[in-house]
Image (cartoon, rainbow, N blue to C red):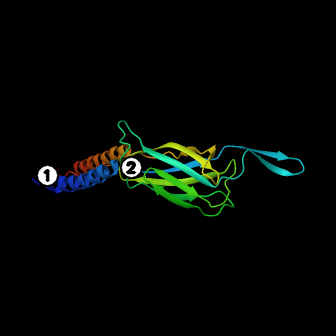
Amino acid sequence: MRSHTKLHLPVLLATGLLAVTAIEALGADSKTITFVRPGNVVQQAKAGPRIQGPGGATKMKVIMTEAGPAPHFSILSGLTAALVTNPAGCPTPTVAVNVDTVWTDWGTPCPLPGDCVTLHFTTPTGPLAVRRSFFTDGLGDSIAPATPYAAPGLTPWGAAALTALLALAGGVAVVRRRRAAGREI
């Protein structure tokens, strides 16, 4: 009779490694969000498109917060943000993070109504949510909301559950193959 450790040890090691990885991921969050500057673009017969509303925005301000059942608003240390997409024709902005606030600065009026800006946020402290976001003029005054649209994705808890189910399915598959081959488990 063969020892159970030959089968169980690799499955246990793999499950343990996956569980540790999933538990580490539960404290972190990574999210890509597209912000849209609302407005109307009206096609005119002779003059071409005309943009209604205020001119181009100089900056975009995004205030992030921790989401979840019991958020701790003071622990957003380690928040980072990176530009993913920039409105066509706009210069590459600087993206600066100050605790929970992310400033995207084009240095010149650029994003117009209807333009989109996509940022990727990460934090080691937990799930993220947008608390407030808006486009500003050169003085920092709000001129338009920055409407967030988060791309759907797998949550850390979903990733942990998926990892555990895959490990369980792998163990079941090994047991069934060995039984089908007439080997002892």
**Residue 108: which numbered mark, if any?**
none
Q: Which residue is mark 1?
A: 4
Looking at this rendering, what residue extends furthest in the left direction?
1
Identify which residue is drawn at 33% across, 43% down.
161
**Distance from the alpha carbon under mark 1 to that under mark 2:** 46 Å
Check disc 1 and give the amino acid type: His
**Is 162 left or right of 14, judged from the image as shown?**
right
Between 160 and 96, the one nearer to me in the picture: 96
Give the class, few, some or many, for how many residues have Cα within 10 Å of label 1's Cα (few <14, many ≥20).
few
- Mark 1 or mark 2, earlier in chain: 1
Looking at this rendering, what residue extends furthest in the top direction?
69
The percent position of residue 16, horizontal first and vertical second, equals: 23, 52
Q: Which residue is mark 2?
A: 76
Between 154 and 61, the one nearer to me in the picture: 61
Check disc 2 and give the amino acid type: Leu
Identify which residue is drawn at 68% across, 47% down.
114
Looking at this rendering, what residue extends furthest in the right direction?
46
The percent position of residue 127, horizontal first and vertical second, equals: 40, 45
**Is 120 left or right of 60, judged from the image as shown?**
left
Can residue 95 be seen here? yes
Between 43 and 184, the one nearer to me in the picture: 43
Between 2 and 123, the one nearer to me in the picture: 123
